[in-house]
Image: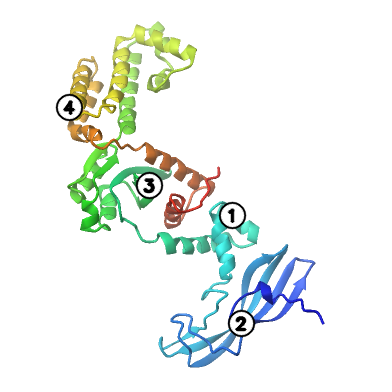
Amino acid sequence: MSSLSIAAYFPWNRVVIAGQNVSSEVDLAVVDVRPDRRFAPLCSRCSQPASRVVSEEVRAVRDLNFASASVHLRLSYRKVYCPACRAVIVEELEAVDRWQRVTRRLARSVHDLCKRMTVSDVADHFGLGWKTVKNIDKNFLEEHYDETDCAGLRLLAVDEIAVRKGHKYMTVVIDYETGRVVWMGEGRTRETLSAFFAQMTEEQKVGIEAVAMDMWEPYIQAVGDALPNAKIVFDLFHVVAAYGKVIDRVRNSEMSKATLSQRALIRGTKYLLLKRHVTDPDERERLRKLLQANETLSTVYILKEMLVRIWRYRSRAWAARALAEWCALARMVPHPEPSRFARTLERYRQGILNHCEFPIHNSKLEGVNNKIKVIKRRAYGYHDDRYFVLKVKQAFDPESDVLFRR
């Protein structure tokens, strides 16, 4: 008598394998699973013994593939009356959660593969619908990342990321020390960031020492309202990027009043003037000729290099002196744009000088934003914003094993 049995591949308690039907032509295996009558049924909601069986039904449930064959369970189960819940409830099925059409172990495999593959790829791999795969993955993610974890936060970085065309943004808050994405919210308004701070306790708010951000007034107001003890630190990257717009406006102005020979020299130099480091010999020579021929562009270009140096000081007094000198030189440029930018720097002077005490910046958050774009691009965009936020939180969880693949 043969002792071979497939029961070992279905190691669930309280059920028995009643039969199997394998079709080699279509790589399909159907396994009959029914409750083990030796056990009294339990309520799937409270796990208490049921008082009576109300009805018996059969459900088709998808399980993990066996070799090349897809496995479907013909699962018999009972609806029972639970005295504790005072309701008719499906009995506890170790193999599958209530109302689900896939086994728990298949759901776990789907979730694990979604860390490394797109939803469509996982759906094709298992022969499931993409909505089913997304919902399985989303359920797992909500178990771990549904609540905003604000414990232990000391340094924050705040920025926005474009999620869709048409100026659709989300605000991103990260723990600067660990790189963990703490929270994401729709929009980039004062109310958006205030919604995050509303989830924090007063003790957690007091624990925030500094917040790195750009000079975006709605964020500044939200931080000022919620975190009166935190220092706002303006990020070098965003300040230099804002000054780059000043350079381009000056370049356009100089272009409009230049002679034909001068226009040929200025034309096409927008990104050349914005580069931090010009290494190409031909570009270096072109830049040299441009700055030599146009004194105004030469001055605003030198001011760009001087602006970067302000963030290198660790002494607040020296940084304040450098900032004052920069603003004075900017006002000497025969163009209104540098003077206007100098007034902006003076208005946000404290946030610029705070970098001496807290040398933090948004470069880490820019790296986070780039990876978020990879996540979005892998799925060709997410229509479910909640699912998108959960995927981002998972990706930047220090304990997660998610891989970034382009």
**Residue 116 place in picture, x, y as percent:** 56, 51
Q: What kind of colouring is applied to the model shown?
A: rainbow
Of the numbered discs 3 and 2, the one sitting upstream in the chain is 2
Quadrant in the picture for the N terminus: bottom right
Q: How many angstroms separate mark 1 from mark 2 (CA)?
A: 33 Å
- Considering only vertical position in the picture, is 277 above or below 264? below
Quadrant in the picture for the C terminus: top right
Q: Residue at x 58, y 71 (%)?
A: 103
Q: Which residue in the structure is indicated by mark 4?
A: 317
Q: How many angstroms separate mark 3 from mark 2 (CA)?
A: 46 Å
Q: Which mark is residue 178?
A: 3
Q: Nearer the viewer, mark 3 or mark 1?
A: 3
Q: Which residue in the structure is indicated by mark 1?
A: 120
Left or right of residue 385: residue 103: right
* Local secondary structure at mark 4: helix
Q: Residue at x 43, y 49 (%)?
A: 396
Q: How many angstroms separate mark 3 from mark 1 (CA)?
A: 31 Å
**Res. 167 in view:** no
The amino acid marked with disc number 2 is: Val
Q: Nearer the viewer, mark 1 or mark 2?
A: 2
Q: Which mark is residue 300?
A: none
Q: Which residue in the structure is indicated by mark 2?
A: 15
The amino acid marked with disc number 1 is: Ser
Q: Residue at x 58, y 62 (%)?
A: 109
**Residue 389 place in picture, x, y as percent:** 42, 53
Q: Name the image quarter holding residue 252.
A: top left
Of the numbered discs 2 and 4, the one sitting upstream in the chain is 2
* Number of numbered discs overlaid on the protein picture: 4
| Callouts 3 and 1 close, C-beta under 8 Å | no
Of the numbered discs 4 and 3, the one sitting upstream in the chain is 3
